[in-house]
Amino acid sequence: MKPRLRFAALLGAVLLASCNLAPPYQSPAKTLGILPVSFKEGGRWQPATPASTLQRGPWWRIYHDASLDSLESQLIAANPDLAAAVANYSSYKDAALQLDAYLFPFVSASGEAGRFQVSTKRPLRHIGQPNYSNFHTMGGELRYEVDIWDQLHNATAAGIALAQAAAADLASVQLSLEADLANAYLTLRELDNDVDLLQQTVTAYQHYLQIVEQRHVDNIASGLDVSQARFQVDAASAQESGLRAQRAVYEHMIADLIGKPASAFSIAPKVTHIAVPVIPTGVPSQLLQRRPDIAAAERRVAAANAEIGVARAAFYPNLMLNATGNFNSSLNAPPLVTLPVSFWSLGASSLAPLYEGGFLRAQLAQKVALWHQATENYRSVALNAFQQVEDALSNLNLLSEQYGHQQAAVKDALRVQQLGFDLYQLGAKNYLEVIVDQELALQAEMLLIDDRESVLLASVSLVRALGGGWTTDRLPGRDAVLTLSGMDPRKPLPPAPQP
Protein backbone atom coordinates (compact mmCIF):
# COMPACT_ATOMS: atom_id res chain seq x y z
CA MET A 1 0.00 0.00 0.00
CA LYS A 2 1.27 3.42 -0.84
CA PRO A 3 2.39 5.59 2.08
CA ARG A 4 -0.34 8.16 1.45
CA LEU A 5 -3.01 5.48 1.42
CA ARG A 6 -1.69 3.93 4.65
CA PHE A 7 -1.68 7.36 6.30
CA ALA A 8 -5.23 8.05 5.14
CA ALA A 9 -6.41 4.67 6.43
CA LEU A 10 -4.72 5.24 9.79
CA LEU A 11 -6.20 8.72 10.08
CA GLY A 12 -9.66 7.37 9.29
CA ALA A 13 -9.33 4.65 11.91
CA VAL A 14 -8.28 7.21 14.52
CA LEU A 15 -11.16 9.53 13.68
CA LEU A 16 -13.74 6.78 13.70
CA ALA A 17 -12.48 5.17 16.90
CA SER A 18 -14.59 6.12 19.93
CA CYS A 19 -12.88 7.78 22.90
CA ASN A 20 -14.97 8.04 26.06
CA LEU A 21 -14.01 11.16 28.03
CA ALA A 22 -16.34 10.52 30.97
CA PRO A 23 -14.61 9.58 34.25
CA PRO A 24 -14.71 5.86 35.14
CA TYR A 25 -17.92 5.47 37.11
CA GLN A 26 -17.70 4.43 40.74
CA SER A 27 -20.73 3.83 42.92
CA PRO A 28 -21.23 6.64 45.46
CA ALA A 29 -21.95 3.95 48.06
CA LYS A 30 -18.22 3.94 48.78
CA THR A 31 -18.56 7.42 50.27
CA LEU A 32 -20.59 5.91 53.13
CA GLY A 33 -17.66 3.93 54.49
CA ILE A 34 -18.02 0.54 56.15
CA LEU A 35 -21.60 -0.10 57.21
CA PRO A 36 -22.52 -1.91 60.46
CA VAL A 37 -23.45 -5.58 60.28
CA SER A 38 -26.84 -5.04 61.92
CA PHE A 39 -29.30 -2.34 62.92
CA LYS A 40 -28.73 -1.01 66.43
CA GLU A 41 -32.42 -0.79 67.39
CA GLY A 42 -33.38 -4.16 65.89
CA GLY A 43 -34.47 -5.89 69.06
CA ARG A 44 -37.09 -8.56 68.50
CA TRP A 45 -38.00 -7.05 65.14
CA GLN A 46 -34.65 -8.11 63.66
CA PRO A 47 -34.59 -11.87 62.96
CA ALA A 48 -31.61 -14.02 63.83
CA THR A 49 -30.95 -14.70 60.16
CA PRO A 50 -29.57 -11.43 58.72
CA ALA A 51 -30.32 -12.49 55.15
CA SER A 52 -34.04 -12.53 55.92
CA THR A 53 -35.69 -9.49 54.33
CA LEU A 54 -39.13 -8.18 53.55
CA GLN A 55 -40.45 -10.25 50.67
CA ARG A 56 -41.32 -8.71 47.34
CA GLY A 57 -44.92 -8.27 46.29
CA PRO A 58 -47.88 -6.52 47.91
CA TRP A 59 -46.29 -5.80 51.30
CA TRP A 60 -49.58 -4.80 52.94
CA ARG A 61 -50.72 -8.43 52.88
CA ILE A 62 -48.69 -8.96 56.06
CA TYR A 63 -51.70 -7.44 57.88
CA HIS A 64 -54.06 -10.14 56.52
CA ASP A 65 -56.96 -7.77 55.86
CA ALA A 66 -58.97 -8.29 52.68
CA SER A 67 -60.40 -4.75 52.72
CA LEU A 68 -56.92 -3.24 52.86
CA ASP A 69 -55.84 -5.48 49.97
CA SER A 70 -58.73 -4.24 47.86
CA LEU A 71 -58.12 -0.57 48.67
CA GLU A 72 -54.42 -0.80 47.84
CA SER A 73 -55.24 -2.33 44.45
CA GLN A 74 -57.66 0.52 43.76
CA LEU A 75 -54.99 3.05 44.71
CA ILE A 76 -52.52 1.63 42.18
CA ALA A 77 -55.17 1.71 39.47
CA ALA A 78 -56.69 5.15 40.04
CA ASN A 79 -54.61 7.46 42.24
CA PRO A 80 -53.98 10.72 40.28
CA ASP A 81 -50.67 11.50 42.00
CA LEU A 82 -49.40 8.07 41.04
CA ALA A 83 -50.60 8.56 37.46
CA ALA A 84 -48.73 11.89 37.35
CA ALA A 85 -45.55 10.09 38.49
CA VAL A 86 -46.06 7.56 35.68
CA ALA A 87 -46.33 10.43 33.19
CA ASN A 88 -43.19 12.01 34.62
CA TYR A 89 -41.29 8.76 34.09
CA SER A 90 -42.65 8.48 30.55
CA SER A 91 -41.43 12.00 29.76
CA TYR A 92 -37.91 11.09 30.90
CA LYS A 93 -38.05 7.91 28.81
CA ASP A 94 -38.98 9.90 25.72
CA ALA A 95 -36.26 12.49 26.44
CA ALA A 96 -33.69 9.67 26.55
CA LEU A 97 -35.10 8.31 23.30
CA GLN A 98 -34.62 11.71 21.68
CA LEU A 99 -30.96 11.76 22.75
CA ASP A 100 -30.48 8.22 21.46
CA ALA A 101 -31.77 9.31 18.05
CA TYR A 102 -28.66 11.48 17.53
CA LEU A 103 -26.59 8.29 17.33
CA PHE A 104 -28.22 7.50 13.98
CA PRO A 105 -28.13 9.27 10.59
CA PHE A 106 -30.71 11.96 9.89
CA VAL A 107 -32.20 11.58 6.41
CA SER A 108 -34.54 14.14 4.89
CA ALA A 109 -36.23 14.55 1.51
CA SER A 110 -37.70 17.52 -0.31
CA GLY A 111 -39.84 17.99 -3.35
CA GLU A 112 -41.24 20.81 -5.38
CA ALA A 113 -43.55 21.02 -8.38
CA GLY A 114 -44.70 24.08 -10.32
CA ARG A 115 -45.55 25.76 -13.59
CA PHE A 116 -43.90 28.82 -15.08
CA GLN A 117 -44.34 31.07 -18.12
CA VAL A 118 -41.56 32.14 -20.46
CA SER A 119 -41.92 35.61 -21.91
CA THR A 120 -42.30 35.74 -25.69
CA LYS A 121 -39.93 38.73 -25.72
CA ARG A 122 -37.21 36.99 -23.73
CA PRO A 123 -33.78 37.41 -25.38
CA LEU A 124 -32.22 34.26 -26.79
CA ARG A 125 -35.45 32.41 -26.62
CA HIS A 126 -35.30 29.06 -28.41
CA ILE A 127 -37.41 28.65 -31.43
CA GLY A 128 -40.37 26.44 -30.63
CA GLN A 129 -40.00 26.81 -26.90
CA PRO A 130 -43.48 26.66 -25.31
CA ASN A 131 -44.83 29.65 -23.43
CA TYR A 132 -45.71 27.50 -20.39
CA SER A 133 -43.62 24.76 -18.80
CA ASN A 134 -43.96 22.50 -15.80
CA PHE A 135 -41.09 21.55 -13.52
CA HIS A 136 -40.52 18.91 -10.86
CA THR A 137 -37.66 18.90 -8.34
CA MET A 138 -36.74 16.18 -5.84
CA GLY A 139 -33.88 16.26 -3.35
CA GLY A 140 -32.49 14.42 -0.37
CA GLU A 141 -29.97 14.96 2.39
CA LEU A 142 -28.18 12.68 4.83
CA ARG A 143 -26.35 13.94 7.91
CA TYR A 144 -24.44 11.80 10.38
CA GLU A 145 -22.26 12.92 13.26
CA VAL A 146 -19.39 10.57 14.01
CA ASP A 147 -19.29 10.29 17.81
CA ILE A 148 -15.49 10.36 18.10
CA TRP A 149 -15.40 11.46 21.74
CA ASP A 150 -18.54 9.61 22.87
CA GLN A 151 -20.28 12.92 23.42
CA LEU A 152 -23.54 11.60 22.03
CA HIS A 153 -23.22 8.26 23.80
CA ASN A 154 -22.59 9.98 27.11
CA ALA A 155 -25.55 12.30 26.56
CA THR A 156 -27.72 9.24 25.90
CA ALA A 157 -26.30 7.46 28.96
CA ALA A 158 -27.14 10.50 31.08
CA GLY A 159 -30.68 10.55 29.70
CA ILE A 160 -31.14 6.84 30.44
CA ALA A 161 -29.81 7.27 33.99
CA LEU A 162 -32.20 10.16 34.58
CA ALA A 163 -35.10 8.07 33.25
CA GLN A 164 -34.11 5.27 35.63
CA ALA A 165 -34.02 7.83 38.45
CA ALA A 166 -37.54 8.89 37.45
CA ALA A 167 -38.60 5.23 37.58
CA ALA A 168 -37.19 5.01 41.11
CA ASP A 169 -39.01 8.25 41.98
CA LEU A 170 -42.19 6.61 40.72
CA ALA A 171 -41.56 3.66 43.03
CA SER A 172 -40.99 6.08 45.93
CA VAL A 173 -44.27 7.88 45.23
CA GLN A 174 -46.10 4.58 44.98
CA LEU A 175 -44.63 3.28 48.24
CA SER A 176 -45.44 6.54 50.02
CA LEU A 177 -49.05 6.50 48.81
CA GLU A 178 -49.45 2.82 49.74
CA ALA A 179 -48.12 3.55 53.22
CA ASP A 180 -50.39 6.60 53.58
CA LEU A 181 -53.37 4.44 52.67
CA ALA A 182 -52.34 1.71 55.10
CA ASN A 183 -51.94 4.31 57.88
CA ALA A 184 -55.33 5.83 57.15
CA TYR A 185 -57.03 2.43 57.03
CA LEU A 186 -55.41 1.13 60.23
CA THR A 187 -56.33 4.38 62.02
CA LEU A 188 -59.90 4.13 60.75
CA ARG A 189 -60.19 0.57 62.08
CA GLU A 190 -58.80 1.61 65.47
CA LEU A 191 -61.38 4.41 65.55
CA ASP A 192 -64.01 1.75 64.87
CA ASN A 193 -62.70 -0.05 67.95
CA ASP A 194 -62.82 3.21 69.93
CA VAL A 195 -66.43 3.83 68.89
CA ASP A 196 -67.37 0.26 69.82
CA LEU A 197 -65.74 0.71 73.23
CA LEU A 198 -67.67 3.92 73.84
CA GLN A 199 -70.92 2.29 72.76
CA GLN A 200 -70.32 -0.47 75.30
CA THR A 201 -69.36 2.18 77.85
CA VAL A 202 -72.57 4.14 77.26
CA THR A 203 -74.55 0.93 77.71
CA ALA A 204 -72.73 0.22 80.98
CA TYR A 205 -73.19 3.78 82.20
CA GLN A 206 -76.90 3.59 81.42
CA HIS A 207 -77.06 0.46 83.52
CA TYR A 208 -75.31 2.30 86.36
CA LEU A 209 -77.74 5.21 85.92
CA GLN A 210 -80.71 2.88 86.30
CA ILE A 211 -79.25 1.52 89.53
CA VAL A 212 -78.59 5.02 90.87
CA GLU A 213 -82.10 6.18 89.91
CA GLN A 214 -83.63 3.19 91.69
CA ARG A 215 -81.52 3.94 94.74
CA HIS A 216 -82.77 7.52 94.56
CA VAL A 217 -86.37 6.29 94.43
CA ASP A 218 -85.61 4.15 97.47
CA ASN A 219 -84.14 7.25 99.20
CA ILE A 220 -80.72 5.61 99.37
CA ALA A 221 -78.98 7.89 96.85
CA SER A 222 -79.24 11.64 96.46
CA GLY A 223 -80.32 13.61 93.41
CA LEU A 224 -76.67 14.64 93.03
CA ASP A 225 -75.74 11.02 92.39
CA VAL A 226 -78.41 10.80 89.68
CA SER A 227 -77.12 13.96 87.99
CA GLN A 228 -73.55 12.72 88.13
CA ALA A 229 -74.52 9.34 86.65
CA ARG A 230 -76.52 11.04 83.89
CA PHE A 231 -73.51 13.30 83.17
CA GLN A 232 -71.37 10.20 82.63
CA VAL A 233 -73.81 8.88 80.03
CA ASP A 234 -73.99 12.19 78.18
CA ALA A 235 -70.22 12.75 78.26
CA ALA A 236 -69.50 9.28 76.86
CA SER A 237 -72.12 9.79 74.12
CA ALA A 238 -70.53 13.13 73.18
CA GLN A 239 -67.10 11.51 73.02
CA GLU A 240 -68.50 8.83 70.71
CA SER A 241 -69.80 11.51 68.31
CA GLY A 242 -66.39 13.16 68.27
CA LEU A 243 -64.73 9.87 67.30
CA ARG A 244 -67.24 9.37 64.50
CA ALA A 245 -66.26 12.80 63.16
CA GLN A 246 -62.59 11.75 63.19
CA ARG A 247 -63.47 8.53 61.43
CA ALA A 248 -65.24 10.42 58.66
CA VAL A 249 -62.08 12.43 57.98
CA TYR A 250 -60.03 9.25 57.49
CA GLU A 251 -62.75 7.74 55.33
CA HIS A 252 -62.61 10.82 53.10
CA MET A 253 -58.81 10.58 53.01
CA ILE A 254 -59.01 6.99 51.81
CA ALA A 255 -61.48 7.99 49.09
CA ASP A 256 -59.05 10.62 47.84
CA LEU A 257 -56.14 8.14 47.83
CA ILE A 258 -58.04 5.61 45.71
CA GLY A 259 -59.19 8.29 43.28
CA LYS A 260 -62.86 8.47 44.21
CA PRO A 261 -65.05 11.40 45.28
CA ALA A 262 -65.54 11.37 49.04
CA SER A 263 -69.28 11.87 48.55
CA ALA A 264 -69.59 8.57 46.70
CA PHE A 265 -67.46 6.42 48.98
CA SER A 266 -67.95 4.77 52.35
CA ILE A 267 -66.43 2.00 54.45
CA ALA A 268 -68.71 0.06 56.76
CA PRO A 269 -67.63 0.15 60.42
CA LYS A 270 -66.02 -3.03 61.61
CA VAL A 271 -64.53 -4.07 64.91
CA THR A 272 -61.30 -5.89 64.18
CA HIS A 273 -58.00 -6.64 65.86
CA ILE A 274 -55.23 -6.60 63.24
CA ALA A 275 -52.14 -8.46 64.42
CA VAL A 276 -48.82 -6.62 64.42
CA PRO A 277 -46.60 -8.48 61.91
CA VAL A 278 -42.97 -9.45 62.46
CA ILE A 279 -40.99 -7.59 59.80
CA PRO A 280 -37.55 -8.92 58.82
CA THR A 281 -35.06 -6.12 58.39
CA GLY A 282 -32.03 -7.76 56.81
CA VAL A 283 -28.67 -6.03 57.18
CA PRO A 284 -27.92 -2.31 56.67
CA SER A 285 -25.91 -2.84 53.47
CA GLN A 286 -28.98 -4.36 51.79
CA LEU A 287 -30.88 -1.13 52.35
CA LEU A 288 -28.89 0.51 49.52
CA GLN A 289 -30.53 -1.86 47.03
CA ARG A 290 -33.99 -1.79 48.60
CA ARG A 291 -34.82 1.89 48.89
CA PRO A 292 -36.06 3.48 45.64
CA ASP A 293 -35.03 6.96 46.78
CA ILE A 294 -31.44 5.76 47.28
CA ALA A 295 -31.54 4.15 43.84
CA ALA A 296 -32.81 7.41 42.32
CA ALA A 297 -29.98 9.35 43.97
CA GLU A 298 -27.41 6.85 42.66
CA ARG A 299 -28.76 7.08 39.11
CA ARG A 300 -28.48 10.87 39.26
CA VAL A 301 -24.82 10.50 40.22
CA ALA A 302 -24.36 8.27 37.16
CA ALA A 303 -26.07 10.88 34.98
CA ALA A 304 -23.84 13.64 36.36
CA ASN A 305 -20.78 11.46 35.67
CA ALA A 306 -21.83 11.02 32.03
CA GLU A 307 -22.50 14.77 31.70
CA ILE A 308 -18.84 15.41 32.59
CA GLY A 309 -17.92 13.34 29.53
CA VAL A 310 -20.25 15.45 27.39
CA ALA A 311 -18.65 18.66 28.67
CA ARG A 312 -15.12 17.35 28.09
CA ALA A 313 -15.93 16.33 24.53
CA ALA A 314 -16.98 19.90 23.73
CA PHE A 315 -13.29 20.90 23.81
CA TYR A 316 -12.53 18.72 20.78
CA PRO A 317 -13.57 18.96 17.12
CA ASN A 318 -16.58 17.06 15.90
CA LEU A 319 -16.93 15.27 12.56
CA MET A 320 -20.06 15.45 10.44
CA LEU A 321 -20.65 13.37 7.32
CA ASN A 322 -22.97 14.94 4.75
CA ALA A 323 -24.53 13.70 1.53
CA THR A 324 -27.00 15.62 -0.65
CA GLY A 325 -28.66 15.04 -3.99
CA ASN A 326 -31.04 17.03 -6.17
CA PHE A 327 -32.84 16.04 -9.34
CA ASN A 328 -34.72 18.43 -11.63
CA SER A 329 -36.88 17.70 -14.61
CA SER A 330 -39.42 19.37 -16.82
CA LEU A 331 -42.63 17.64 -17.70
CA ASN A 332 -42.21 18.97 -21.25
CA ALA A 333 -38.81 17.30 -21.50
CA PRO A 334 -38.04 13.57 -21.66
CA PRO A 335 -39.53 11.38 -18.90
CA LEU A 336 -38.57 11.99 -15.27
CA VAL A 337 -36.49 8.86 -15.08
CA THR A 338 -34.04 10.31 -17.56
CA LEU A 339 -33.05 12.91 -14.92
CA PRO A 340 -31.99 15.58 -17.42
CA VAL A 341 -30.62 17.89 -14.68
CA SER A 342 -29.14 16.53 -11.45
CA PHE A 343 -26.37 17.09 -8.94
CA TRP A 344 -25.04 15.44 -5.77
CA SER A 345 -22.42 16.05 -3.12
CA LEU A 346 -20.66 13.90 -0.55
CA GLY A 347 -18.26 15.16 2.06
CA ALA A 348 -17.34 15.74 5.66
CA SER A 349 -17.20 18.81 7.85
CA SER A 350 -15.65 19.52 11.21
CA LEU A 351 -16.09 22.23 13.80
CA ALA A 352 -13.53 22.86 16.51
CA PRO A 353 -13.59 25.56 19.21
CA LEU A 354 -10.73 28.06 18.97
CA TYR A 355 -11.77 30.82 21.34
CA GLU A 356 -14.98 31.01 23.38
CA GLY A 357 -14.06 33.26 26.28
CA GLY A 358 -13.79 30.44 28.83
CA PHE A 359 -17.31 29.16 28.22
CA LEU A 360 -16.29 25.50 27.86
CA ARG A 361 -14.14 25.53 31.00
CA ALA A 362 -16.94 27.10 33.00
CA GLN A 363 -19.36 24.52 31.58
CA LEU A 364 -17.08 21.67 32.59
CA ALA A 365 -16.57 23.15 36.05
CA GLN A 366 -20.34 23.38 36.45
CA LYS A 367 -20.79 19.70 35.51
CA VAL A 368 -18.10 18.69 38.01
CA ALA A 369 -19.85 20.76 40.73
CA LEU A 370 -23.17 19.11 39.85
CA TRP A 371 -21.49 15.70 40.19
CA HIS A 372 -20.29 16.62 43.68
CA GLN A 373 -23.79 17.84 44.53
CA ALA A 374 -25.35 14.58 43.30
CA THR A 375 -22.83 12.55 45.31
CA GLU A 376 -23.52 14.46 48.51
CA ASN A 377 -27.27 14.20 47.89
CA TYR A 378 -26.79 10.43 47.67
CA ARG A 379 -25.00 10.40 51.02
CA SER A 380 -27.77 12.50 52.56
CA VAL A 381 -30.54 10.25 51.24
CA ALA A 382 -28.74 7.06 52.32
CA LEU A 383 -27.95 8.32 55.83
CA ASN A 384 -31.54 9.53 56.24
CA ALA A 385 -32.76 6.07 55.20
CA PHE A 386 -30.67 4.43 57.94
CA GLN A 387 -32.07 6.93 60.45
CA GLN A 388 -35.64 6.14 59.41
CA VAL A 389 -35.09 2.41 59.86
CA GLU A 390 -33.55 2.89 63.29
CA ASP A 391 -36.38 5.27 64.27
CA ALA A 392 -39.01 2.77 63.19
CA LEU A 393 -37.28 -0.10 64.98
CA SER A 394 -36.93 1.83 68.24
CA ASN A 395 -40.57 2.91 67.99
CA LEU A 396 -41.71 -0.67 67.49
CA ASN A 397 -39.68 -1.93 70.44
CA LEU A 398 -40.64 0.81 72.89
CA LEU A 399 -44.26 1.13 71.79
CA SER A 400 -44.67 -2.64 72.05
CA GLU A 401 -43.39 -2.46 75.63
CA GLN A 402 -45.78 0.40 76.31
CA TYR A 403 -48.67 -1.62 74.87
CA GLY A 404 -47.83 -4.54 77.16
CA HIS A 405 -47.78 -2.30 80.23
CA GLN A 406 -51.04 -0.67 79.18
CA GLN A 407 -52.73 -4.07 78.93
CA ALA A 408 -51.88 -4.65 82.58
CA ALA A 409 -53.08 -1.15 83.46
CA VAL A 410 -56.46 -1.80 81.83
CA LYS A 411 -56.97 -4.96 83.89
CA ASP A 412 -56.21 -3.03 87.06
CA ALA A 413 -58.45 -0.10 86.13
CA LEU A 414 -61.42 -2.34 85.31
CA ARG A 415 -61.03 -4.14 88.63
CA VAL A 416 -60.87 -0.83 90.49
CA GLN A 417 -64.00 0.34 88.68
CA GLN A 418 -65.97 -2.75 89.61
CA LEU A 419 -64.79 -2.78 93.22
CA GLY A 420 -65.53 0.93 93.56
CA PHE A 421 -69.11 0.53 92.33
CA ASP A 422 -69.62 -2.44 94.65
CA LEU A 423 -68.46 -0.27 97.57
CA TYR A 424 -70.83 2.49 96.44
CA GLN A 425 -73.75 0.10 96.53
CA LEU A 426 -72.72 -0.86 100.05
CA GLY A 427 -72.64 2.82 100.99
CA ALA A 428 -68.89 2.89 101.57
CA LYS A 429 -68.21 5.31 98.69
CA ASN A 430 -69.84 8.37 97.22
CA TYR A 431 -70.72 8.44 93.54
CA LEU A 432 -68.12 11.09 92.67
CA GLU A 433 -65.45 8.55 93.56
CA VAL A 434 -67.19 6.01 91.34
CA ILE A 435 -67.12 8.49 88.46
CA VAL A 436 -63.38 8.96 88.89
CA ASP A 437 -62.88 5.18 88.79
CA GLN A 438 -65.05 4.88 85.68
CA GLU A 439 -63.20 7.70 83.91
CA LEU A 440 -59.84 6.13 84.70
CA ALA A 441 -61.00 2.76 83.36
CA LEU A 442 -62.38 4.29 80.17
CA GLN A 443 -59.22 6.30 79.54
CA ALA A 444 -57.09 3.21 80.17
CA GLU A 445 -59.05 1.20 77.60
CA MET A 446 -58.89 3.98 75.03
CA LEU A 447 -55.16 4.40 75.60
CA LEU A 448 -54.77 0.67 75.01
CA ILE A 449 -56.48 1.02 71.60
CA ASP A 450 -54.35 4.07 70.81
CA ASP A 451 -51.17 2.22 71.80
CA ARG A 452 -52.12 -0.66 69.54
CA GLU A 453 -52.69 1.79 66.71
CA SER A 454 -49.28 3.37 67.37
CA VAL A 455 -47.57 -0.01 67.13
CA LEU A 456 -49.35 -0.81 63.85
CA LEU A 457 -48.43 2.60 62.38
CA ALA A 458 -44.83 2.09 63.50
CA SER A 459 -44.80 -1.22 61.62
CA VAL A 460 -45.96 0.59 58.48
CA SER A 461 -43.18 3.13 58.98
CA LEU A 462 -40.67 0.28 59.20
CA VAL A 463 -41.99 -1.25 55.97
CA ARG A 464 -41.71 2.13 54.27
CA ALA A 465 -38.19 2.66 55.65
CA LEU A 466 -37.15 -0.75 54.31
CA GLY A 467 -38.43 0.03 50.82
CA GLY A 468 -41.60 -2.05 50.88
CA GLY A 469 -39.91 -5.09 49.31
CA TRP A 470 -38.62 -3.05 46.33
CA THR A 471 -35.16 -3.85 44.96
CA THR A 472 -32.91 -2.22 42.38
CA ASP A 473 -33.41 -5.10 39.93
CA ARG A 474 -36.82 -3.53 39.24
CA LEU A 475 -35.17 -0.52 37.62
CA PRO A 476 -35.80 -0.51 33.86
CA GLY A 477 -32.83 -1.41 31.66
CA ARG A 478 -31.67 0.43 28.57
CA ASP A 479 -34.10 -1.38 26.26
CA ALA A 480 -37.04 -0.71 28.55
CA VAL A 481 -36.17 2.97 28.81
CA LEU A 482 -35.70 3.42 25.07
CA THR A 483 -39.28 2.52 24.20
CA LEU A 484 -41.74 5.08 22.93
CA SER A 485 -44.59 6.14 25.21
CA GLY A 486 -48.09 6.75 23.95
CA MET A 487 -48.48 9.56 21.41
CA ASP A 488 -52.26 9.91 21.60
CA PRO A 489 -53.35 12.18 24.48
CA ARG A 490 -56.76 10.54 24.43
CA LYS A 491 -55.25 7.20 25.46
CA PRO A 492 -53.95 6.71 29.01
CA LEU A 493 -50.32 5.85 29.68
CA PRO A 494 -49.47 2.38 31.04
CA PRO A 495 -50.43 2.06 34.72
CA ALA A 496 -47.95 2.03 37.57
CA PRO A 497 -46.17 -1.31 38.00
CA GLN A 498 -47.65 -3.74 40.50
CA PRO A 499 -45.57 -4.43 43.62
Image (spheres, grey):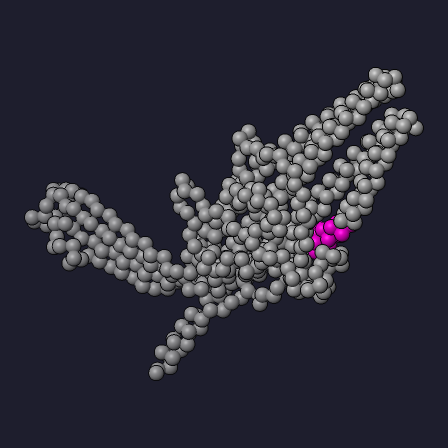
Q: Which picture quadrant has residue 252?
A: top right
Front-most of residues 264 and 144: 264
Looking at this view, name the residue that lies furthest to the left.
128
Q: Position of residue 314 (x, y in %)?
A: 51, 60
Magenta stretch, main secondary structure class: helix
* Residue at 42% from the left image edge and 60% from the top image edge: 103
Q: Compared to 437, does 224 lie above or below?
A: above
Is 450 colored magenta in this rendering?
A: no
Front-most of residues 485 and 247: 247
Q: Quadrant of the N terminus?
A: bottom left
Residue 442 visible in the snapshot: yes
For this view, does 404 lie left or right of residue 2?
Answer: right
* Residue at 7% from the left image edge and 49% from the top image edge: 127
Looking at this view, name the residue that lies furthest to the bottom.
1
Looking at this view, name the residue that lies furthest to the front.
218
Which residue range is magenta in the image? 384-398
* Residue at 30% from the left image edge and 59% from the top image edge: 324
Q: Position of residue 50 (x, y in %)?
A: 68, 64
* Residue at 54% from the left image edge and 43% from the top image edge: 70
Q: Position of residue 483 (x, y in %)?
A: 43, 55
For this view, does 52 lie left or right of residue 450?
Answer: left
Residue 366 visible in the snapshot: no
Is 387 colored magenta in this rendering?
A: yes
Q: Compared to 79, does 300 lie above or below?
A: below
Q: Position of residue 278 (x, y in %)?
A: 68, 54
Q: Which picture quadrant has residue 430?
A: top right
Front-most of residues 308 and 183: 183
Front-most of residues 478 and 497: 497
